[in-house]
Image (cartoon, rainbow, N blue to C red):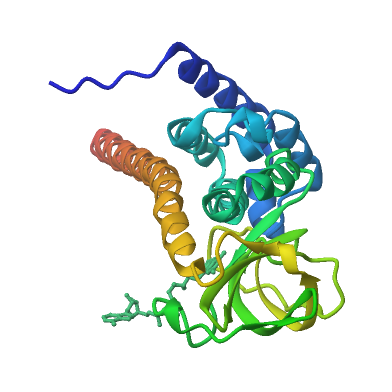
Amino acid sequence: MFEFKFTEEQNMLRDMVRDFTNNEIKPIAAKIDEEAKIPRELITKMAELGFLGISFPEEYGGGGFGEVGYCIMQEEIARGCMSTATFIGAHQSIGTNAIFNGASEEQKKKFIPPLASGEKIAAFGLTEAQAGSDSFHLKTKADLVGDEWVINGEKLWITNGGIADFVSLFARTEKGISLFAVDTNVPGFKVGPPEKKMGIKEVTNPLSFENVHIPKENLIGTDGRGFIYAMKTLDAGRLGLGAASGVFLKNCLSFLQSMQKNAYNLIIQYRTFRQYSLCLQRWQ
Ligand SMILES: Cc1cc2nc3c(=O)[nH]c(=O)nc-3n(C[C@H](O)[C@H](O)[C@H](O)COP(=O)(O)OP(=O)(O)OC[C@H]3O[C@@H](n4cnc5c(N)ncnc54)[C@H](O)[C@@H]3O)c2cc1C
């Protein structure tokens, strides 16, 4: 029979993240949702503790905890704030992981450490207005001109778009869909207004690329294999999202149960009060 047990290290990770969530995230969770903003100070604290690269191997500056460790961390963060868990997911599990999945050894050593340490915040740029579920038909273009790629196009619904220093960008070349590492401090890169959302309030924006020039070597992995890297990345992204959403649902259920208990208590109190007042009337 398959027996699944967490290691001592994984249990220690859970305890550490749980304490951090209780002390640093829960008290400001309502404010995060009201302002639709994860405070910079919170991002810095999480980066210092290694939360922003927990899944990646230590040789690239990560925590070496793999996907299981990442899911443990996301469960605990989501217990306190789903917006913060989603911010981490977009940065780590899709934004940085896309590079990890596609990059050569040399590219991993160059691009992963500043992302895993949280020195740079990442976003994952795949979706477009006409290419959501059907992302294979994306239209953003990358043309090789001399020693540079020139990128033109628009992306939609990009989580962390407004705060990202780095985008894992999917664009079409002559060979098919390819993945590019794009720093956001380049001329021609623009961020549109944040989407207004009902819940999960980390920032989500449209992005535009107008004649954005990036070095030739920022094409990640093999030209034309970007769609495979994207699908592999989204598979892993769903794991963490599942872990966070499971806890989120559990929280909703216990909230409803406590409401139900309160309502039940109110009914009992009302009935007792009515019995007393009827007795009182009869006695009078
Ligand atoms: C809050 C939020 C954050 C996001 N963050 C990111 C991000 O960081 N990066 C990124 O690249 N994207 C992001 N996205 C985009 C997300 O991945 C897309 O919304 C998703 O791929 C669905 O695309 P769509 O919204 O265009 O819906 P559509 O593709 O238009 O689908 C609408 C509905 O039609 C159904 N449907 C579609 N095609 C078919 C078919 N052939 N047969 C039957 N049913 C079909 C779908 O299942 C769905 O129910 C985000 C979206 C949201 C809402």
Q: For residue 218, say whether it is visible.
A: yes
Quadrant containing the N terminus is: top left
Judged from this view, the residue extending furthest toward the front is: 146
Q: At x 58% / y 59%, what residue is drawn?
A: 221
278 relative to 137 in the view: left or right: left
Q: At x 32% / y 18%, what residue is drawn?
A: 5
Ligand 1 placement by image quarter: bottom left
Quadrant containing the C terminus is: top left
29 relative to 10 in the view: left or right: right
- In the image, 222 versus 84, the foreground residue is 222
Q: At x 40% / y 80%, what residue is drawn?
A: 134
Q: Position of residue 254 (x, y in %)?
A: 36, 38
Q: Position of residue 150 (x, y in %)?
A: 75, 81
Q: At x 51% / y 67%, what residue is drawn?
A: 226
139 relative to 71 in the view: left or right: right
Relative to residue 169, is residue 63 depicted above or below? Answer: above
Q: Position of residue 160 (x, y in %)?
A: 67, 60
Relative to residue 88, is residue 70 depicted above or below? Answer: above
Judged from this view, the residue extending furthest toward the left is: 1
Q: For residue 26, say whether it is visible.
A: no
Relative to residue 122, is residue 20 depicted above or below? Answer: above
- In the image, 59 versus 200, the foreground residue is 59
Quadrant housing residue 133: bottom left
Q: Position of residue 4 (x, y in %)?
A: 27, 22
